[in-house]
Image (cartoon, helix red, strand yellow):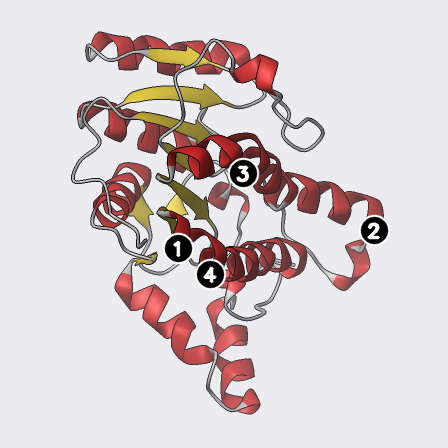
Amino acid sequence: MGVKAFANSNDRTVWVTGASSGIGRATAIEFAKRGAHVVLTARSQSKLEEVAAHIRSLGRNAWVLPVDLARTTPTPSMLAELPAIDILIANAGDYFPTTAQDVSAERYMALMQLNFGGMLRCIEAVLPSMLQRRCGVICGVASVVGYRGVPRASIYGASKAAMINFLESLRFDLEPNGIQVTIVSPGFVETPLTAKNTFPMPFMIKSEDAARRLCDGLLAGRREVHFPYRMSYLCKLMRILPFPIYHAISRRMTKGDEK
């Protein structure tokens, strides 16, 4: 059995993690505009309630499920009062710039626990039901910096590379069971996370634009969604460039960084 993409998200239940701000918040609202009901997860219940109120004002249902995904796996009891999840958007994550002088195994592993581990915990929670129903969508929001190492993104890039590799491998098992796996790799998107950067960020787009592109690609059944194209195709090209050229381009990308 192959994967049959959802024609639309009308009356589907979509679970968005990292939904209190940035791409997650914009994606939750975009799905609601397209007729979906939305489960919202992040650590801040108050921020989630604001997003939920917005979604309800659009005439769709919204449920708030505050969880620290770096530490906690959502249990069946947490999900018991919710409809079956049709689409998982594993978006929760954090970012901080890194240098060799700042290496901290404890801090780095904490970020890996959220960015990569948080996705794993959500997949573990929804996969039994999807396998039983032989349908569903698992979407991981990675990043173009997961394609190859770039300056000042060592642990963030590593966490996103882990997401990409894991989902590519998982897809071989899930597609024959009717479950779509979509990897989303944004470039620079205007969010509280990119506000931490001190270097120029080319081709930056708004989070609402990112959400529209994510939803369009996912509902079209695409295995990979990446944007904006000028940035994402450059990063794809860097995977096959000879090392000296890749190294020079990567250095240039962060020229002007204050550190």
Q: Position of residue 22 (x, y in %)?
A: 41, 34
Q: Position of residue 124 (x, y in %)?
A: 59, 36
Circles 3 and 4 in contact, beta carbons < 8 Å: no
Give the CA separation, mark 1 to mark 3: 17 Å
43 relative to 130 in the view: left or right: right
Three-letter amino acid code at the position of disc 3: Ile
Residue identifier under label 1: 176
Residue identifier under label 3: 123
Whether residue 93 appears in this view of the structure is no
- Discs 3/2, front: 3
Residue at x-position 28% and y-position 55%: 222
Residue placed farthest to the right in the image?
105
Give the CA separation, mark 4 to mark 1: 7 Å
Residue at x-position 46% and y-position 85%: 240
Three-letter amino acid code at the position of disc 1: Pro
Three-letter amino acid code at the position of disc 4: Phe
Residue identifier under label 4: 172
